[in-house]
Each structure stands twice: as C-alpha cells, then as structure tokens.
Image (cartoon, rainbow, N blue to C red):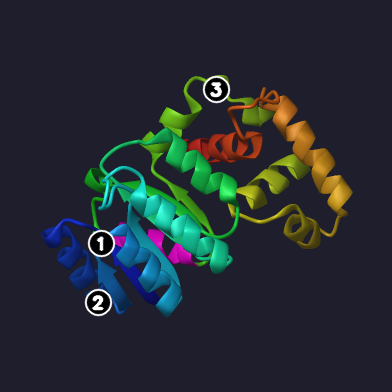
Amino acid sequence: MRIVVAEDLFLLREGLVRLLKAHGFEIAAATDSAPGLLGALLEFRPDLAIVDIRLPPTHTDDGLRAALSARERIPGLPILLLSQYVEQIYAQELLADQAGGVGYLLKDRVFSDGQFVDVIRTVAGGGTVMDSEVVTKLLGRRNRSEPLSRLSDRERQVLELMAEGRTNSAIAHRLFISDKAVSKHSTSIFTKLDLAPSDDDNRRVLAVLAYLMSATRR
C-alpha cells in the first residue's frame, strides 16, 4: 500500500513515516504543507492520504482543502485526517463528500500501532472510521434516546452500507433492491432518527454518525 503523509511537525512526520515503513507500507511522499500535499497526491495517486487538517500556509483548514481538491481529480481517494482537535465542520464535509474511504482520528487518542494500522487498512479499503469523541461532538444529544432501535432490519442494512461509504446505487446492487427502494429506506431512516431537513446538517452524514456512535458502545 502506497501512502502520502502530510504533517508539518517534523518529529511527528518522521515518526509516522518510520512507523508505517515498519509495518510494510510504502511512503510515496511525506510533506509539511498543503501545496506539497496536493502536488504529491496528484503525482503519486496513492492508496491513502494521511493528512493533518491544519497545515501551512495558513494553519487553518489547508490540509483538508488540499485533500478534497485532490479527491475531485482522483475519485475515491481514501483520506485519513489526523488532528489535535474536534473540528466539526471538517468532519461533516469529509463525510458528506461520500467519494471514498474516510477517517478522522485525534492524535492524542491513538494508543497503539496496531490500532492505527487497522484504521489505515479500513479507510484504504473504502470504510469509515471516526474517533468516538469526534462522533459525540458532532451528534451532540441526538443519539441519547438510542433511535437506532427504531430501524427495521433492512433499514439497518442500508445504514450500515452508508457507513461504509457506499452510494445508493452500490447499496441497491449489494442488497439486490432498486435505487428507488434505497431512497425510500433512506428517507425512513432519517425520519426515525429525527433528522429533519436542514440547511445546516447533511442528514446522511448525521445518520452515519449515529450508526458509528452505536457501534462504539457495543
């Protein structure tokens, strides 16, 4: 597996590179800036991008913007975000993109190389991995009444496939049902999870987050 790493702190970047190499991953590039990240992703087209959200030149959202820009040109590029903070808007934007594997880990909550490697393989394979603190912050109080218990077995299957980053067409193919049926199940899921239409929230994103939070409690 070929990986591009973007981290502006020298010791952390080099530590990541050494850790990944020790587990057999190939490092296509390791960069310390958003422009360097975008260039490396477009040049090497790796299997995964590991990205610090806050990169030079502005140290705001440059890392995420560069990764999403690259994914527009490399459909399905898996992105694993690393951050010191829970930055809600970025997690929502990444999940809403629905174009490939996604992950969001907090740097101080990665406790072992085995855990980290498992996340890498999951995201590179098209899955979704979110730190539980990120999920809790995004959901707020939405999940406290365990609304997932309201879903039918078929609706839970649809939601599980949503959480894997699959499109409606891919879900329909996997479950041997029509696209129209998937849309109908999705609408029912949103209703049962109390996710009313909103200009601010992406209901699909929030539904996936509810599912991920439930999974962390099991």
Measuring 46% from the left and 31% from the top, which residue is drawn there? 138
Q: Residue at the spot x=52%, y=67% of the render?
A: 125
Q: Disc 1 designates what residue? A: 113
Q: Residue 142 bears which disc, if any?
A: 3
For the point 39% across and 58% down, the residue is: 119
Label 3 – label 1 distance at C-alpha:
32 Å
Residue 143 sits above or below residue 42 on the image: above
**Mark found first going from the N terminus, 2 or 1:** 2
Residue type indicated by callout 3: Arg
The quadrant the N terminus occupies is bottom left
Question: Looking at the image, do the residues carrying marks 2 and 1 touch, with CB atoms under 8 Å apart?
Answer: no
In the rendered image, residue 133, in percent from the top left (x then y), is placed at 37, 35
Three-letter amino acid code at the position of disc 1: Asp
The one nearer the camera, 186 or 160, is: 186
Q: Amino acid at mark 2?
A: Lys
Q: Is residue 151 visible?
A: no
Which residue is identified by label 2? 21
Kindly report the secondary structure that dominates the magenta region of the rendered protein.
helix
Q: Which residues are magenta?
A: 113-124
Counting residues from the start of the chain, the first of labels 3 and 1 encountered is 1
